[in-house]
Amino acid sequence: MMAEYSLIGVRTMKKVISWLLVVVMTAAISVGGTMAYLSNTDEDVNVFTVGNVKIDQLEYERIDVETKNDDAILQEFHDDKPLYPAVADPGFDWSTDDAVAEWNQIGKNDNSGIWNPNLINNEQDKMVFVKNTGDLPASVRTVFAFECGDYSWDEFQTMIHMNLNDTDYSWEWIQTPVEIDGSNYFLVTATYQYVLEAGQLTEPSLLQVALDGMAGNDDIMSLGDEYTILAASQAMQAEGFTSPEAALVEGFYRVTTQKHPFMEEFKGMLIYDEYDLREFALVGGEARVMDDFEVTSRVYFSTSDYVLDMNGHTLTNSNLSSSKTGFAIRVDSGSTMSIKGNGRFIDNHVDKDYYYSAGIFCVSGAGSVLTIEDGYYNVGIKENTNMFCQVQASGKIIVHDGVVLNSETDRAGDLLYCMSNGICEIYGGFFRNNGSPWSILNVSDGNPGWFTIYGGTFVDHYPGKANDTGKIKVADGYTVISEEQPNGEIWYTVVPAG
């Protein structure tokens, strides 16, 4: 199911550092907001009529910035707020919000707990609400991205403090940073736990932000010259779903490092199935995979240059054609193809006896180049047939990173096979062949290709040790180190010499 939404009026939270003393800093802080809209129908999920689901994201602060009394008047949030390291009483607990902010001024007869202004100073209000401005009940969520610099998850939690409403929202953090516009962020999804009726306002999700009182020069430098918090709100019709989370995941997606509202606008082709992949092979350019799917017969990439973003999804090769070659993807006729996006490629030929050679990729012809940036590749090898990639006729594969393996212990075969002057360059990655570790890299006896290895780790396989070691070699200026594992395996890793 496809969901449609638009983000309007996106703003960012920026903290511009200016040094006052050696370890004292001031900053300007503003948090971004969005207005989102979704309209869709799909009988498969008992959605018959949607109408127009609309929301506004509203952001407030208290005007009484000196005392921040419980009854302080609210105003729309303004950018460029000073954010100093927090000054708190010795016994202050960040998890305690025993003061109250009232919301009746903005049409909601309710209140929320805030940090006690008598116990802490230099905290900053940022109160984020969502209002249903449409005609139908809606499920809503706000996705936040907090810049984290070089911080680990634990360091980030210590340095940046947030007052979050965990009574009315469920919070799902992703503890692996994601890169957005060249900076690292931690993502969190705040899902409102109730159906938001037409015309109604949520309780706030985020209320306040503070910089830890122990923050010093090194901490600020880790975050860079600007600090950014992003926010994007999304809405889905509530009717027909068992919970707000179910509605939002079905209408949009579950937020991950590969799928979130702050991804750059993608202008390439979206791939949902094998038919889309075949169309992409005809038109070229860049494409992003949006769902897991199978390939039932080989797809030729031979008319253009291609960039395939797997977007964390899985492609399974179930090529059942009568041909004796069952590769899922073939790059030839001088075309180039780059694979990225940490996807998974699974070969499903374990029980196919009639294949001469099969696997995931075949690269053939001078000028044809396949580049592997990352990902996971598992080939179901059957009697010397299936492989990760066969390179032939002066074609070329370049491997920068990824996990390449044959997980079947009772089936032997090659992972990477070069013949007819095929070229393979390996700069990184992890390679394991449970069925025949001696045959991770191999060349044809009578008509070989060439391997040059600049990096990577090979399980129980010394790089260059094959049926023709003159064709498989570690690059000049590089060497091999070995490390025995607790299970007795030997891992050989290619590193720069010296």
Image: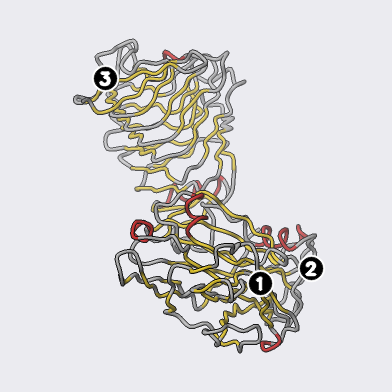
Q: Quadrant of residue 388?
A: top left
Amino acid type, label 2: Glu
| Count of number-bearing discs | 3
Residue 437: image location, x then y, percent = 45, 15
Q: Secondary structure at mark 1?
A: loop
Residue 45 appears left or right of 228: right
Task: Give the residue at mark 3.
Answer: 473
Q: Residue at x 54, y 50 (%)?
A: 175
Quadrant for the C terminus, please: top left
Q: Residue at x 73, y 63 (%)?
A: 244
Q: Residue at x 69, y 83 (%)?
A: 103
- Please tell me whether residue 39 is drawn above or below residue 348 in the rendered image: below
Amino acid type, label 3: Lys
Q: Residues within 10 Å of mark 1 (few under 14, many from 20)?
A: some
Between the residue at mark 2 and the residue at mark 1, the CA separation in whole angstroms equals 13 Å
Residue 285 appears left or right of 153: left
Between the residue at mark 2 and the residue at mark 3, the CA separation in whole angstroms equals 62 Å
Task: Give the residue at mark 1.
Answer: 39
Q: Residues within 10 Å of mark 3 (few under 14, many from 20)?
A: some
Of the numbered discs 1 and 3, the one sitting upstream in the chain is 1
Residue 408: image location, x then y, percent = 57, 19
Residue 179: image location, x then y, percent = 43, 55
Q: Residue at x 59, y 56 (%)?
A: 255
Q: Are marks 2 and 1 in contact (CB under 8 Å)?
A: no
Amino acid type, label 1: Ser
Residue 210 appears left or right of 255: left
Task: Give the residue at mark 2.
Answer: 239
Of the numbered discs 2 and 1, the one sitting upstream in the chain is 1
- Please tell me whether residue 432 is drawn above or below residue 37 in the rendered image: above
Front one among 113 and 297: 113
The colour scheme of the drawn protein is: secondary structure
